[in-house]
Image: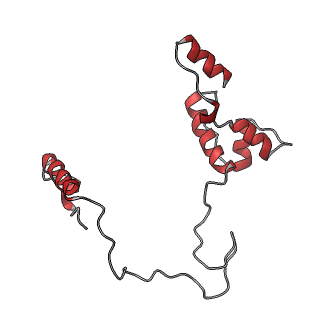
Amino acid sequence: MGFINAEFARLGLPPVSNDLVTDTLSLARRKHPMGPNSLDALCRRYGIDNSHRTKHGALLDSELLAEVYIEMIGGRQAALGLMSGQSRGEVADTDETIVPTGQRPHPLPSRLSDADVASHAALVAKMGDKAIWAKYDPLV
């Protein structure tokens, strides 16, 4: 964090507040106190493919770190289980599946105002007949 703020100071820009920064290295050290916490080690630990990372590059590293961060905070959902009482990775042996009931008894009201609909129609009209939006009714 200090390096970024030092560069900002050289450019005459205000520093970035610590409140706006997530320190992924300290998060990794808290989650995995005994293991190595380099980007390569975290990619291996979470099964993230970094085989195309032959040299250090800020853009590639930030993309990999974003994937690692999602894994560290438990944000990625492995599967969508729609069975009641089913725990992760377990197949229910009962017939208690949740089945969608079909159409709503009363459709939800549109959140589009008349001005929104008119503005959209005018924009689509400017695009011409080949515009993909011309195939869709905005009120559906």
Q: Where is residue 70 drawn, in percent x and y?
A: 62, 48
Q: Where is residue 132 drawn, in percent x and y?
A: 23, 55
Q: The N terminus appears in which quarter of the rendering?
A: top right
> Viewed as shown, does residue 101 lie left or right of 57?
left
* Front position in the image: 35 or 49: 35
- Is residue 88 visible from the viewing direction of this image? yes
Q: Where is residue 7 drawn, in percent x and y?
A: 59, 16
Q: Residue at x 61, y 20 (%)?
A: 5
> Viewed as shown, does residue 46 lie left or right of 21?
right
Quadrant assignment, res 34: top right
Residue ranking furthest to the bottom: 95
* Front position in the image: 23 or 92: 23
Residue ranking furthest to the right: 34
- Is residue 41 visible from the viewing direction of this image? no
* Front position in the image: 117 or 113: 113
In the depicted structure, whether residue 86 falls above or below residue 67: below
Q: Residue at x 25, y 68 (%)?
A: 140
Number of marks in the rendered image = 0
In the depicted structure, whether residue 33 falls above or below residue 139: above
Quadrant assignment, res 114: bottom left
In the depicted structure, whether residue 39 falls above or below residue 127: above
In the depicted structure, whether residue 26 falls above or below residue 106: above
Quadrant assignment, res 88: bottom right
What colour scheme does the image use? secondary structure
